[in-house]
Image: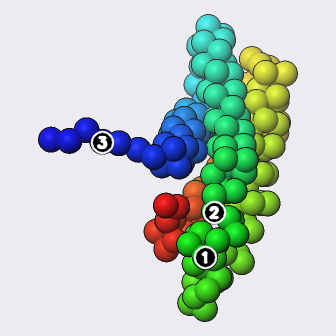
């Protein structure tokens, strides 16, 4: 059986989508559960400290992964997408009337709206680090943090979905 070989573009696309994306998903799942469970009737004082310690690590990891995804996408992967050559994914999508909307809407989302994800994830990380164990006493702040966390995830999830569908329609070669 031959070893799997990746081109530079395939490797960076893998890092962008699968490595940072996987850390982002794990951080989101753990962070949302951690925020949701920070309720006085569910935890002891010792449990709150332990939970908040893990929550801080999870939300910071999610924020770092979100920034890693957006930065590698913007500065490494996307320039290959938009190369001014007939074989570039952008050129292929724009040349096909059935696929050009993938560029006009999908890539615009990925280029612009997806930046809200790391910004919101950073806000969440700041709130969790700033409030720490006192989040358990500030229900409105905790719920607002959960909302921001979910929005960060949704912006990234839509960008990831568009990325997968665009790559299926016009892969980087």
The kind of secondary structure element at disc 1 is loop
Read off the residue under disc 2: 81
Foreground of the two, 89 or 119: 89
Res. 173 visible in picture: yes
Residue drawn at 46 percent across, 68 percent down: 168
Q: Earlier in the sequence, mark 1 or mark 2?
A: 2
Figure quadrant of residue 134:
top right
- Choose mark 3 or mark 1, whichever is in front: 1
Q: Earlier in the sequence, mark 2 or mark 3?
A: 3
Residue drawn at 79 percent across, 35 percent down: 122
Left or right for 120, reference 52: right
Foreground of the two, 48 or 172: 172
Foreground of the two, 36 or 115: 115
Q: What is the number of the mark on residue 86?
A: 1
Residue drawn at 79 percent across, 44 percent down: 120
Label 3 vs label 1: CA separation? Answer: 28 Å
Read off the residue under disc 3: 4
Q: Name the spot of residue 104 as percent of width and height, x first.
A: 71, 78
Res. 144 visible in picture: no
């Amino acid at each position: 059986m031959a070893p799997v070989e990746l081109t530079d573009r395939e490797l960076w696309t893998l890092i962008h989508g699968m490595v940072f994306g996987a850390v982002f998903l794990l951080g989101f799942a753990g962070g949302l559960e951690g925020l949701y469970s920070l309720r006085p009737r569910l935890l002891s004082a010792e449990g709150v400290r332990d939970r908040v310690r893990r929550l801080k690590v999870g939300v910071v990891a999610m924020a770092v992964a979100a920034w890693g995804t957006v930065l590698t996408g913007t500065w490494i992967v996307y320039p290959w997408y938009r190369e001014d050559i007939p074989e570039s994914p952008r050129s292929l999508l724009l040349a096909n009337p059935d696929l050009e909307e993938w560029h006009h809407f999908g890539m615009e989302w990925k280029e612009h709206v997806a930046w809200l994800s790391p910004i919101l994830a950073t806000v969440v990380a700041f709130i969790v680090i700033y409030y720490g164990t006192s989040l358990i006493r500030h229900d409105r702040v905790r719920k607002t943090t959960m909302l921001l966390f979910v929005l960060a995830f949704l912006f990234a999830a839509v960008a990831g979905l568009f990325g997968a569908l665009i790559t299926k329609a016009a892969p980087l070669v």
